[in-house]
Image (cartoon, helix red, strand yellow):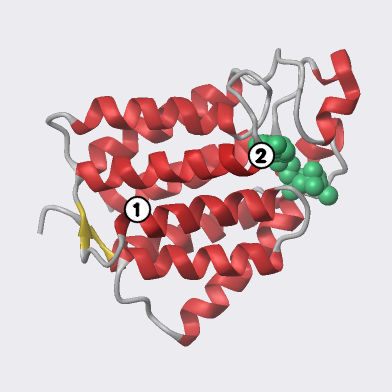
Amino acid sequence: GQGLDAAWAVDWLLRSAAVVADNRVALSELDRAIGDGDHGENLDRGFSAIVAKLDEEEPATPGAAFKMAAMTLMSKVGGAAGPLYGTAFLRAATAVGDADALDPTLLVAALTAARDGVVARGKAEPGEKTMIDAWTPAVDAAAAAAAGGSPADVLLAAAEAAEAGAVATDPLIARKGRASYLGERAIGHRDPGAASSALILRAAADAAVS
Ligand code: ADP
Ligand code: MG
Ligand code: MG
């Protein structure tokens, strides 16, 4: 059909796991500069566990895939990012319910719910040098692309905006999380969670165009 189905969701999670593994050291390097140096390890542990779960059972819907990802990230990823990403995937799962496939409208609803979940959990506003600075422009770009666009168009727009949003965290002072303890010393460093969010949203687009 017109929408992105369970196979896309599984492909997204597998591609996310691959890109997180490939960037494990780089993400922890970013976190070493303004945090405690574990962001790559944290996410790699979570996404490796997701891959192991997918080996055991195949989710029937995108929502089931998101829910499995949420539960796994919450239980396997310590630190700030685990509950934040876990909440994002859980809210996305709720937004799509038991739909077999996600059309642009449902896709935007899922991305919006994910972003809103991160905000509800972490209370970050845009410009505070967190993953929200990738997610919020991604949601806005996705919503704009959904008018007349395909699901792949929506995700390509989201990925591009997330990447620009991550780059735009470089000059910011952090107001949330460990990096907030650094004050002006955080200036000139990319937020690791914004960087990983851009990678994961790019994986979603890659899965949609493949
Ligand atoms: P920890 O800081 O506990 O070691 P990670 O290193 O895995 O956790 O994740 C750090 C990332 O989490 C940051 O780069 C930032 O993007 C994100 N983060 C931290 N606190 C918040 C928050 N309150 N709201 C949104 N994102 C946050
Ligand atoms: Mg850390
Ligand atoms: Mg930590």
Q: Position of residue 108 (x, y in %)?
A: 30, 40
Vertical order, 173 against 157 (above or below): above
- Residue in the image at 64% along x and 63% along y: 74
Ranked by sequence position, the earlier of labels 2 and 1 is 1
Residue occupying the point 49% across, 70% down: 68
Q: At 68% across and 69% down in the image, what residue appears?
A: 75
The answer to whether one can see residue 26 in this image is: no
Q: State the mark number for residue 122.
A: 2
Farthest residue to the bottom: give it: 56
Q: Which residue is at the front of the view, 111 or 206?
A: 111
Does residue 103 appear in the picture of this structure? yes
The answer to which quarter of the image holds residue 101 is bottom left
- The residue that appears at 24% across and 36% down in the rendered structure is 153
Camera-nearest residue between 111 and 149: 111
The mark total stands at 2
Residue 127 position within the rendered picture, expressed as x and y whole percent measured from the top left:
62, 18
Q: Is 63 rendered above or below residue 115?
A: below
Secondary structure under tag 1 reads helix
| Dot label at residue 131 | none
Residue 165: percent from left, percent from top: 53, 23
Q: Position of residue 39 (x, y in %)?
A: 75, 48
Depth check, front residue: 156 or 3: 3
**CB at mark 2 closer than 8 A to ligand 1?**
yes
Image quarter where ligand 1 lies? top right
Question: What number is the disc on residue 95?
Answer: 1
Separation of marks 2 and 1 at Cα, in angstroms: 19 Å
Report the side of 136 relative to 144 (left or right).
right
In the image, 1: left or right of 89?
left
Amino acid type indicated by mark 2: Gly
Binning the other alpha carbons within 10 Å of mark 2 as few (below 14), some (14 to 19) or many (20 upward) gives some
